[in-house]
Amino acid sequence: MPSNASAVLAEKFLHAFALHPDEFGPLLTDDARWWYPKSAVDKGFLKSACAEGRDAILHGLRVAGYKWVELSLLHLIEEGDMLSVHAHGEGETLTGKAYSNNYSFLLRLVDGKIAEGWEYVDTAYVFALFE
């Protein structure tokens, strides 16, 4: 069972990741790394599968093509310094299309902050939505 601190961090993370970069920054270590699905690079949505450093990660959130997204926690698993967060997102794109997708995040924590994150999402759905 995840600790209370991990559950609080997971809820803060989901809120901040959903287009609140100013709240996401304090949850990250200075040298944090964020891994995106390789298919996003292959399709040309991203230049690199890894954002290195807090500023690069926050830039990725700031240029996302959504008016709003709300992420809800479905499952949370903690083991050592790793946190697995399963969530569902609902929102709207900048062009007014409805958005609904499931996410899985694997987070490596250092001193209660996110040092590394891996993001898994249905990229085929995202690509179709933005074409």
Image: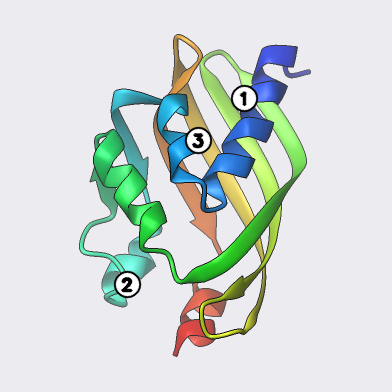
Residue 107, percent from left and from top: 50, 31
User: What distance separates the C-alpha of mark 2 from that of mark 1?
Assistant: 28 Å
Residue 125, percent from left and from top: 56, 78
Identify the residue at the far bottom of this view: 131
Identity of the residue drawn at 52% across and 69% down: 66
Closer to the camera in the image, 61 or 31: 61
Identity of the residue drawn at 45% across and 9% down: 111
Type of the residue with mark 3: Glu
Residue denoted by label 1? 9
Question: Would residue 72 appear left or right of 128 to someone viewing this image?
Answer: right
Residue 36, percent from left and from top: 38, 54
Estimate how packed mark 2 is, as few (under 14), some (14 to 19) or many (20 or more) residues with alpha carbons within 10 Å: few
Label 1 secondary element: helix
Residue denoted by label 2? 45
Quadrant in which the N terminus is drawn: top right
Type of the residue with mark 1: Leu
Residue denoted by label 3? 23
Label 2 secondary element: loop
Label 3 secondary element: helix
